[in-house]
Amino acid sequence: MKTSLIVCIPENAPPSLAELEVYSKDLENIEFLKTNTIAAAVLQTQKASIAVCLICVSEKSDLVSLMSLLETTSPEITAGTLRVIAINKLAHEKIPLMLKGKGCFEVLDFKVGKKEFNFKLNNYIKLARQAHNRLVKDAELSGSDVSKKSLSKIAAKNNQDGKTVISWDKQLDHSSDFWLITNKKNIRNVLGQWLIQILGPGPASGSWEKSELTLGKKQGWEWKVGPQFLDTFKVSEGRWIFFGREPEFSWKDNLWSLVSRQPVLAYYVENEPTAYRMISEDPKRLLITENSKHGNNFLEAIQKTIDNLKTFKDEKKKSSAFDDLIDEELDKTHPADVTQEAPKDSSINDDQMYRDFNTGSLKDARQDEEELPWKAGADAMETLKLELFVKQKNSVDINPPILVELIEVQDHNIILDIPAGSVNLSDLLNIDVCMTEGKTKNETTIEVVADHFESEEEEGRIMVLAYTTDDRTRKKVKNILDIYIKKQQFLLDFLTAAKG
């Protein structure tokens, strides 16, 4: 099936757009459709099963027409089979935000470079095709036809059913329950993978070892207590087993990271589960038991097995204004599509969750609001260096950090060249972005999730990673990279002029 490339751009378009028809001939299964008006583009999108629509916004009337197109094609946009891209010429900072809020996939500058644009175009086409293929598979499984109308209905239903739900059950009455959820924000679902950070006996007291048990395709990992802690963390005749990826310990947060599409942490006796601390029978639902009285009784013993834990204080003390500020900032980054279902007598709340454990250095995100200055004149000749390091994977520190190369920054994604074998799809990464300009250093940390590969070779992978970090941090990263690009251009212009 052909993908329609629908374009509505002026005759005086920059080279990257003016040569689009010629470039499209080298693309596989592409139908190039050029229209003179946005209204005509609407008609073409309604006919196409898979489409990428490029609209140039050079006047206010274009903006109004584009808003109408986005509203009319909302079902196709929701399905993902239509990607609408605006090529913006209007100088108004709120236009990109407004268009994205209406369903525009990306807003590009009118003077976007040819190489960058061609790379993006290939990505738009690939994403639209992938969305269509997923819907076709869903239709075949449900016995529906694969007409455009039918696929739109399936997409609408999938979108409605797409929210993940965390349900809380009553606490276990189990003497060996030494696992604790220290904050509800430590349970997240990112691109279909559950990531749970849980407090328990530290690495000094035992380890997770590969079990002979599996659950479907999920490998089991058995918690084995070291000889010197057998009396402290008694497991009587049974054993704790987690099904998913091998649990890893985060020394920054002093928590175990459990990752799985359908995580299960259960107590087994003679290869049969007798108690569940958490279980996911549906990838979109996770059932967790509340922290038990037994778990609370283990707190002091757990503390002794983990280095650098803060001294316990009164758990019932009133939270400070700074604590409230941190909670407020964390709330902004907590996934909006996760619903928490807790019983009325819940012993776990978001305001008071073992605050005195060392959960890493929390920084007031509001201090980064000011834009970084662009140095001009002689200062612009200072040495400039940009480095990106992967410091954490699935909340576990990486030592030494992995150096990666920046390929491109998009509104919702960042594209990197990553060493082969170092990162897998759905991995949650913390990446330090550091730009050194002379003696001035600007740095920040972004959280991203590995979405898909653009290409893969023996020495490295071109990977697209989706942002999960907040808008303020994204803005700072974009500002750093804008300065880097501007500086590169300044030096290029200077050298060109110097050479005549």
Image: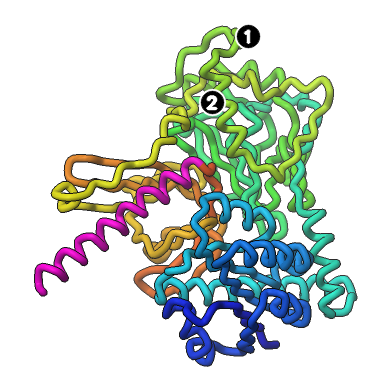
Near mark 1 (Cα within 10 A), the count class, few <14, some 14-19 or many ≥20, is few
Q: Nearer the viewer, residue 494 or 353?
A: 494
Which quadrant holds the C terminus?
A: bottom left
State how far apart marks 1 and 2 are (Cα).
18 Å
> Dividing the picture into quarters, in which one does residue 150 lie?
bottom right
- 333 is higher (above) or lower (below) than 420: above
Near mark 2 (Cα within 10 A), the count class, few <14, some 14-19 or many ≥20, is some
> Dividing the picture into quarters, in which one does residue 4 lie?
bottom right
Which quadrant holds the N terminus?
A: bottom right
- Residue on which the image places disc 1: 316
- In the image, taking residue 395 as reference, residue 181 lies left or right, namely right
- 14 is higher (above) or lower (below) than 416: below
- Tell me where residue 430 appears, x and y as whole percent: 45, 46
Q: Which of 374 and 218 is in front in this view?
A: 374
SS class of the residue under badge 2?
A: helix
In the image, the segment drawn in magenta is 472-500
- Residue on which the image places disc 2: 326
- Which amino acid, by three-letter code, is at mark 2? Ile
Q: In this orientation, does residue 226 appear?
A: no
Indicate the colouring scheme: rainbow
Q: Does the magenta stretch include residue 462?
A: no
